[in-house]
Amino acid sequence: MKWHVLRPLWLAIGLVGAILVARQFLVPDDFGVHGRNFTYGYHRLSNIQEWKDFPVKYKGRESCAECHEENVLKLNSSSHAAVECENCHGPSVNHPDDVELLPLNKTRELCLRCHAFLDYPNSARGQLISIEDQRHKRRYECVKCHNPHDPKEEVE
Amino acid sequence: MTCSRRDFLRNTVGGSLASVMPLSAFTLLSHAEAEAALADSKVRWAFLVDTNKCVGCGLCVTACKTENEIPFDAAVTRTWVERYVVTKDGETHIDSPMGGRDGFIDDKIRDEEIDPKTIDKAFFVPKLCNQCDNPPCVQVCPVGATYQTLDGVVLIDRNWCIGCGYCVMACPYGVRFFHPEKKVADKCNFCYHRISKGMQPACVECCSFGARRIANLNDPDDPVAKIIKTERVSVLKDEYGTKPHVFYLGLDAEVR
Amino acid sequence: MLEEPVVHGIEWTVKELFVYPNEFIYWSIQIVMYPYMTGLVAGAFVLSSLYHVFGQKDLKEIAQFSLVFSLALLPVAALPLLLHLQQPTRAMEPLLTPHFTSAIAAFGIVFTTYGLIVVSEIWFVYRKYFVEQVHALKGKTGLSNAFRRMVYRVLTMGAFDVSDEAIRVDKKAAAIFAAVGIPVACFLHGYAGFIFGSVKANALWMSPLMPVIFIMSAVVSGIALCMLTYIVIMEWRAFRQRRRGGVVMAGEIKGAEKEVIGKAARYLIGFLVAAISLEMLDLIFRGYTAMKSWDILRSVMYGKDFMNIFVLQYTLGNLVPFLLLILPRRSLFRTVIALLLVLFGVFMMRWNVVIGGQAFSLSFSGYMHYEIPIIPHSIETFKEGLFGALMVITTPFVLFWVINKFVPSLQREY
């Protein structure tokens, strides 16, 4: 028996062995099947917690009401009740700890998102109070005349 | 919501813990015990989109980009809104400028004027990751960088993804993309960091019209889940067998 | 240099009509190069095995050469992938945590297996030569001789027995590897076809015929490339002989060359017919069943991509070389033209599948045009542009030149 024929086999085994050893060092210990099955649940387990720890930016109206109760109450009883504070004021994140004054968006473009007239029949958009942008006070910000916390209120 | 926030929080936290703990301690529990814990997961996330209510303001897209740190000026987004305008000649005009990030203010579609008198119907369709029950994107990942949690959300491990793009090609809905800065795959995950704390996804929070709602199909008291189960809902591209979990009210036949 | 974060694919994608916001041409030129290179690998190996396994004695010369060339091509098959990955430093992960439900995960295993088979076969074929070289270089002075001797010693792997029986065993082992390697080579390229064929989301790719079409055209390209390179080398040798006045020797070289090429051409024609038949079958089925995607597919195939598919691939890349090869009184010149067209045709097939599959949107209501970056202005436009592709196509020849310095694939005794 000519044993030299097995040399390539040793090479192959060595290579596979090296990969398995590398695997011990390079693959995190919690990598495996953690979900339903191998097809849909093969992953590194600690990644789930990493995603849960992702920082939250938008805190929601209740969190704004903790300090700005008056504004929130006014908004709640107006025709803009459904509009979220942070839609115009931006996400609160850690306000007021990191940012004292949130970057308020007063542009026309923001209001036009809902209130630019689009002649679409049978559409919720078609039913909103709207203007034709080109024909209504083109030079001014909407908030100059309309109070976003109570759009029906007269503004000086 | 009829259940109190405390209950919701308790169920969610309890459910998440119950699903994660047996797995993280699988060396201590037997295989059978782990299986049993998997079986009665208390949460299965689903989403309900009401296209009858969407006005195309695009505030959801802006909120999503901000909340999930997707570069604002990049032409990719985890969720988007499509505008459909069906005219009398049978043509359907569709657009989604920057995913609807800035809303739809112009009535021109790709610089084409459409005479309003010729419009039969027009509507807006928000789209996001369907968190499918048979996610083809998870099936084709060569390294196990994307996976489905027990509560049904498909997540991506940013530290393990090699950026081959197979998952992006495999998704029939086009919800996946490459994050321009992280250089790995990315997609909507129902704001997993928010729903795990009992909050709403950012897009749901910021929608003023109630067009977007999240549901826990395994919660018998969840009112949104009730709508999904009792009213007429549809899904996108069900012919691919993906079993998507974003349900639509008022989904038109013209929607692609 | 800190680059501005750019959406991957935006620089070479032009969208038309309605395309989903996140859709871009993500799989571009490097993903065209990858199946092309693995196809050449598979084809070269199959050609070599026609001699080792099926005893086609006339193919002996080209068989030796194509075996080594297959080895030179192998690392280059991985190169397009490394250039394409958004995270190339994580390229080993398919070997470390292979998710076997993915066709790409098979890559690590199949690639490694096939590499081991080719290396083993080459070892068994040339071991005697390595041993002889170790003895011949003994006692010779000079750094380059010492280096060469060391390389040959390593290559022998310590097996110095060159008795008749040992050589007989070597030949038998080589034949076994050649036989085993055929299905592995087919699998290497078949799975590349499976990568595309199993993507149900893509209306053009999704087809059970895809792996078979890929294998057939891979063998075609492999045989064509080996024949072409062989002709170039033989012509060069004959030219050198004639310059030295060795007209008879030159004549012998040319004669042998003609016989070998004639034989190989017959196999090429066979696989060419098979490849085109399958593609026609796929097209006819699609048109006949007219699924939801047929409208957009038809407008892409008969409209924007008509030139690429019907003129460049089917006519120039298949029909014309087929005619050039089967018509009587085939000259060497005609053969070379045919081989070049075949190689071009197979490249166009890969292009039409990869790029063509992304030419239409998932919405079936829009198109994407691919504008390959020519002059790179960033790392990404180099990697996924023309120069990246050129880098991939030239490397095997460089590698072959290096390997050939130690493994004499062109000498007639082996």
Image (spheres, coloured by chain):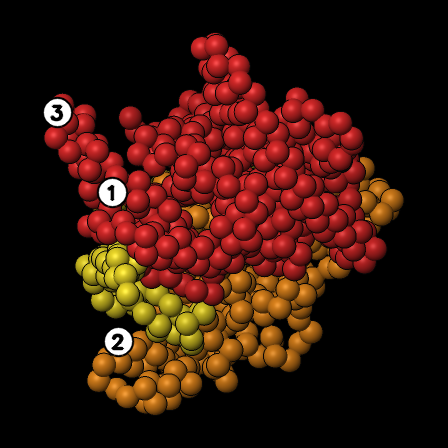
Which chain shows up in red?
A: C
User: Cβ–Cβ below 8 Å for labels 2 and 1?
Assistant: no
Residue C326 in sight from this viewpoint: yes
- Above/below status of B191 relative to B77: below
Q: Which mark is residue B30?
A: none
Label 3 is placed on what type of residue?
Answer: Thr
Q: CA distance from mark 2 to mark 1?
A: 56 Å
Task: Give the residue displayed 50% in from the left and 85% down from the top.
Answer: B220
Q: Nearer the viewer, residue A124 or B246?
A: B246
Task: Give the residue displayed 58% in from the left and 70% down from the top.
Answer: B243
Q: Chain of mark 3?
A: C
Q: CA distance from mark 1 to mark 3?
A: 18 Å
Where disc 1 sits, the SS reads helix
Give the left or right position of residue B2, taking residue C211 as reference: left
Residue that mark 1 sits on: C131
Residue that mark 3 sits on: C141
Which chain shows up in orange?
A: B
Which chain shows up in yellow?
A: A
Residue that mark 2 sits on: B24
Label 1 is placed on what type of residue?
Answer: Val
